Amino acid sequence: MLHTALPVEVTAIDIHPQPSWLAGLRRNDPATVRTLYTKHFPLVRQYVLKNSGTGSDAQDMFQEAMTVLWLSVKEGRLVPDADPGGFLYRVAKNKWLDVVRSAAHKHMKVVHDDRALDPATDVPDDIEERIVRLRGVYDKLDDKCRAVLDQFYFERKDLATIAAGMGVEEESIRTIKYRCMMKLRAFRKSISGEDQNEA
Amino acid sequence: MSQGALDRNTFEAIEAYVLDRMDTDERTVFEQRMAMEPALREEVDLERENIRAVELGGVTRMLNEIAQEEGTKSAGLSGSGWGTYLKYAAVIAVIATGAIWWFTRVPLNERLFAEHYAADPGLPVEMGVADDPLFADAMVAFKLGDNSEARSKWSPLLKAEPNNDTLRYYIACASLGMNDALSAIPLFEGVANDPASAFRDKSKWYLFLAYIKQGELEKAKALSLDDDPAYRERVRAIKAELE
């Protein structure tokens, strides 16, 4: 069963204690991401290699699966007591089966498509569409904006630390951050305006 | 608010709310405002989405970095610029030194084995042919160079089918790949003496190399591969060096 809550940041009001990997992903902790990667990638790699893929294919599938896991956690849309290894394996496996079934890979034979035998999928239906949309927004940023926003929103550094690292005044970073976010806002507004006009 | 500009104070208030950096009182007041101002709610949703997009960019960057590091680790080299060139140079120097030592110190049979041995590439493991997933799992390990895992997965299968020449051949290959020529020899001998086996010729070649490695040079010399166009020249050259 899926959590159907709105995509909001899940905070400390949760009643049940959460596993460390879950808390780590929520705060974008690099050590947690690295641990999940090194622990669960080998199984995915083995599956992809066994099914006509390369090491590079395996990395692509695993990274996509990690992204799906991360976003599901951030938005509180993961089933309770989810097993991250099982989740990553299922998502990566299904993605690879989609690849081998695509036009470019029609010559490959697929016998182990046991998706129908999998337990009810725990991947939110619209999550991949959402990832594509969010990537489209991020693509609108130039390198300078990415450097500042990434440190502030992803790495959660404070303005003073970012300013010291970039050799500028704290107020400059604050202004750059505001302007960059206003660029994204304008982009999103233009899209929603177009959608309304089409409607 | 929705189509016009968003002033910096409002933007930062929304940011503090989304990032959960408001204290309880501030949060309560802000949520009361949201309840009464649909335009503010819309701005909150929009800013949350934009922050999420930035975070997604960050997570993608982090995953790429980890993948790159893992790949570099497995390649045994890391770094960039001159550091990388220096590391390459150091590695080449170590290999060259090792090679000089090897060719001057290593016994003849070990040197001949090292010169001529190349691991069997294994069988293709494709969808549609994995009738036996256990065999296929082991073959994936073998192709990745993990001979120990391959042998441990194939060995129980051979117990169930002791006359299976494919299993005997690949277990022998995995053993030889682990420098365990002693275990490989009887398995290669069995397949090399089986005229019906598709692995007969390759078994004779690897048996020849296994004898060399093990120092059983008389047995190696007695083994004839004169009828085998793929291996006979190499066998003659090795035998000539042994003389």
Image (cartoon, coloured by chain):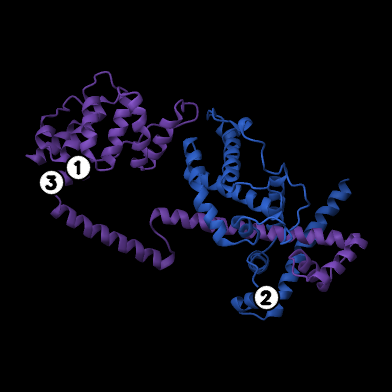
Chain colours: A blue, B purple
Give the CA separation, mark 2 to mark 1. 63 Å
- Label 3 resides on the chain identified as B
Q: Residues within 10 Å of mark 3 (few under 14, many from 20)?
A: some
Q: Is residue B66 above or below residue B109?
A: below
**Residue B108, numbered circle:** 3
Name the residue rendered at 36%, 32% in the picture: B154
Residue under disc 3 on the same chain as residue under disc 2: no
Q: Secondary structure at mark 2?
A: helix
Q: Relative to the observer, which residue lies in front, B114 or B226?
A: B114
The answer to whether dots 1 and 3 both sit on one chain is yes
- Name above or below for residue B184 compared with residue A146: above
Q: Which residue sits at x=80%, y=53%?
A: A191
Which residue type does callout 1 highlight?
A: Phe
Q: Position of residue A6 (x, y in %)?
A: 78, 52
Do the residues under discs 2 and 1 have CB atoms within 8 angstroms? Answer: no
Q: Quadrant of residue B149?
A: top left
- Which residue is label 1 attached to? B113
Mark 1 or 3, nearer chain start: 3
- Disc 2 marks which amino acid? Leu
Q: Nearer the viewer, residue A140 or A70?
A: A70
- Find residue A159 and name its label: 2
